[in-house]
Structure formats: C-alpha cells, structure tokens
C-alpha cells in the first residue's frame, strides 16, 4: 500500500494535534507516494535499526521517539542523526514517529503501563486542555436524522466512553432568499418560516475540518447556519499520565519488586519508604517528573515515571513513594500499542518488532 494511506490512518487515530508544542511526531522521512511492504517497530531509530530494516526488507520504520526534533541545516555525516538520515535515504526507508500524541490518547503509553500492572478504574492524570469545540447548527426537521448521523460518523458527539452525544430542541427559523439563490424551501424575495431543530454537539478540535465538511455535504440548505465555540472543559479521557488502583494493596517492597519485574527495570530508583501500603498508583511513561504534583493531588500512594531529579526524591518526603523505573523501560510497550493499531486496520500488512535494544543507558 501507499505510505500516505498508513500515515493518514495513524495521524487520525493518534491525532497529531495531541502532541506537545516541542514535539515532531508524524512522517519524518519519505515520500507519501512510496509503496511500502512492511514496517519495523522500534522505540528509537539508530544506525543498527536502519541496518536491521535493510536486512529484513522493511521499507518503513515506525518509532516512538522522533528521529528529527530540530531542523537539520546540513547532512554531512557529522552527527548521529545526520548519519541515520543519510542511511535511510540511501536505502529508501521511510520513518514515522508517534511520540507525545501517543502519550496523550486514551489507549496510550501510560494506559499500557496500567494494563501491564493490572490496575483498575484508570483515569487520566492531567487531562488535555483546549482540545474541545461545541458545534451548534439548525436543521430542517425532514433532514435532521440524516445530518445528525453524518456528524456522528465524522467523529462528533464523543464524550468519554459515550458517543453520538447531542442535544436538540425544535424551533422556528426565518430567512428570505435573494434573487440569485436556489432555496431548498420557500420563495425568492419572501420571508419564510421553517420548522427547524437546533442541534448541539461536541467534537475534538482536530476533527473540525471533517465534521464541518460532513455538515455542509449533508445539509440541504445552500447557506448552512452553524456556530463553533471553543470550550474550556478538560478532555477527561485524553491527556498525560494516568492513575488507577490495585484490587488489593501491596507493601511498598512488593510493589517495587513488581515494577522491576513487569518493566524489566534494572536499578529502579525510589524515594524514602512511607511505611504505607500501595493501592492507588499514578503513572507516566517517559519523563513525567512535571506531574508529581498531579500525582500527589490524585491521592496516589506511589508515582512511577522516569528522569526524576535528585531534589524531587528529597521533596517527596513521606507524602508519596516516587519510583524512577527508567525512560526506556516505562516506554518499552509503545511498540505493542502501534502493532495492535496497525494490524487491526491492515491485517495483511507485515509488521515486525525490532530486535535491536536501543536503550542508551546501561547498568552494572
């Protein structure tokens, strides 16, 4: 299939607008019209991973960490990134990355950690902000169900685990068609009163274009009246980190051993033991130290993430058990997420897990 087809799917199911401002997710390298035969999944793109892709005949590498964070001013082989880009271009290998947008979706990195730990009642730790819009439109009664259903098909009306959400009320709409119009109902030059239904629904901001298109394509009026409002509501199903509970509490030592085992984490770092049992756990794959206050506010007994700073461990006191399980270790299951997504949509497309260990950190 074409690279563009896979990229379009991934860009939609792991929305690019969900990524942080500093990030660079999406297609990193390659032409959309490329024919791709298989994909290799990895956390990082390294020279060894490129060599592995060449050996396997994979025309696409999909990584969690983007290869290109900042623009390259030259490609002379003088840096690690330049050499990888050069190797990929020579081998006709495309590179796609899903980073902080994969952190933010409701099936993302932290949720995968929670699943591996078998946590229950999992919720977002820091909900995504400024990501919701409200659509208000006015539809003649005869076409209400048609237009409403097309809006829902385009992705409007999703609130948490519910979809097809909307509110409607019947009223009277008025308009007068001009000389150069072809009105759906009424006559040119005469005031017309039409029984209409006001529909209100919500949508993610990144779905604005397809939802508005669905509205305009399905609505019978020449001129469609609609309003879009930005909402300040938090999107409670998407965002960074998550928090959940064990069915039964664990001792802190048993919990630490579980983290080491589940994430195959050597040299787990942790703050002073609090002496309490661990039942409620906050998680954030990768560098999540900025969410420590959120973890405390959630009432979690422990917070598992990576790249925690020295003073953060000290400041934790006996308020919460901070656990640094390693950056790579807390993100290692991202390839499983990507595999499941791709195979569900393209079951006959060949997807392989890289056998290259790209973790740059070693332990004695």
Image: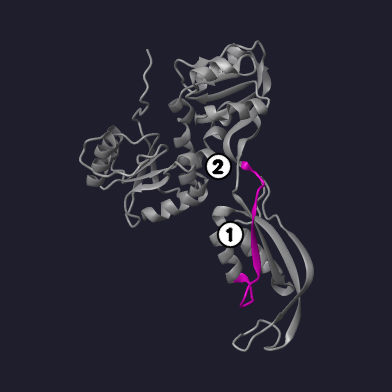
Picture residue at 52% right of the left edge, 18% below the top: 311
Q: How many marks?
A: 2
Give the position of the N terminus as an image quadrant: bottom left
The residue that label 1 is drawn on is: 154
Instruction: Tell me the element at label 1.
Output: loop
Q: Is residue 346 left or right of residue 85?
A: right
Instruction: Give the residue displayed 79% in from the left and 68% down from the top.
Output: 170
Above or below 235: residue 326: above
The residue drawn where x is 74% and y is 83% is 192
Other residues around mark 2 within 10 Å, as few (<14) / some (14–19) / many (≥20):
many
| Of residues 267 and 174, the one drawn nearer to the viewer in this rendering | 174
Q: Position of residue 225 (x, y in %)?
A: 65, 70
Task: Please give the label number shown on residue 350.
Answer: none
Q: In front: 204, or 290?
A: 290
Q: Which residues are magenta?
A: 218-237
Determine if residue 295 is in view: yes
Residue 282 % position (x, y):
61, 27
Q: Nearer the viewer, residue 246 or 205?
A: 205
């Amino acid at each position: 299939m074409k690279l563009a087809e896979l990229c379009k799917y991934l860009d939609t199911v792991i929305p690019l607008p969900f990524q942080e401002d500093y990030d660079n997710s999406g297609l990193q390298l390659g032409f959309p019209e490329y024919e791709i035969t298989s994909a290799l999944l990895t956390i990082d793109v390294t020279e060894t991973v490129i060599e592995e892709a060449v050996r396997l005949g994979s025309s696409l590498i999909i990584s969690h960490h983007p290869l290109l964070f900042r623009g390259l001013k030259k490609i002379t082989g003088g840096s690690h990134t330049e050499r990888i880009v050069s190797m990929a271009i020579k081998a006709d290998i495309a590179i796609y990355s899903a980073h902080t947008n994969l952190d933010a979706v409701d099936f993302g990195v932290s949720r995968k950690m929670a699943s591996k730990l078998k946590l229950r009642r999992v919720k977002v730790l820091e909900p995504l902000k400024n990501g919701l819009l409200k659509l208000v439109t006015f539809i003649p009664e005869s076409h209400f169900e048609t237009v409403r259903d097309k809006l829902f098909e385009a992705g409007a009306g999703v609130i948490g685990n519910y979809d097809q959400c909307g509110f409607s009320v019947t009223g009277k709409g008025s308009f007068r068609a001009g000389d150069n119009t072809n009105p759906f109902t009424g006559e040119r030059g005469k005031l017309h009163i039409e029984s209409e239904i006001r529909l209100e629904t919500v949508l993610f901001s990144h779905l604005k274009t397809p939802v508005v298109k669905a509205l305009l394509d399905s609505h019978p009026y020449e001129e469609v009246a609609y309003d879009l409002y930005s909402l300040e509501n938090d999107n409670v199903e998407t965002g960074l980190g998550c928090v959940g509970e064990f069915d039964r509490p664990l001792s802190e030592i048993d919990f630490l051993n579980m983290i080491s085992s589940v994430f195959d984490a050597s040299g787990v770092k942790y703050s002073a033991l609090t002496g309490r049992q661990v039942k409620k756990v906050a998680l954030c794959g990768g560098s999540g130290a900025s969410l420590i206050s959120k973890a405390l506010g959630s009432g979690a007994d422990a917070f598992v993430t990576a790249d925690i700073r020295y003073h953060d461990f000290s400041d934790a006191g006996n308020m919460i058990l901070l656990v640094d399980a390693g950056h790579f270790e807390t993100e290692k299951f991202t390839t499983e997420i990507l595999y499941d997504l791709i195979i569900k949509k393209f079951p006959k497309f060949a997807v392989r897990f890289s056998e290259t260990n790209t973790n740059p950190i070693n332990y004695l």
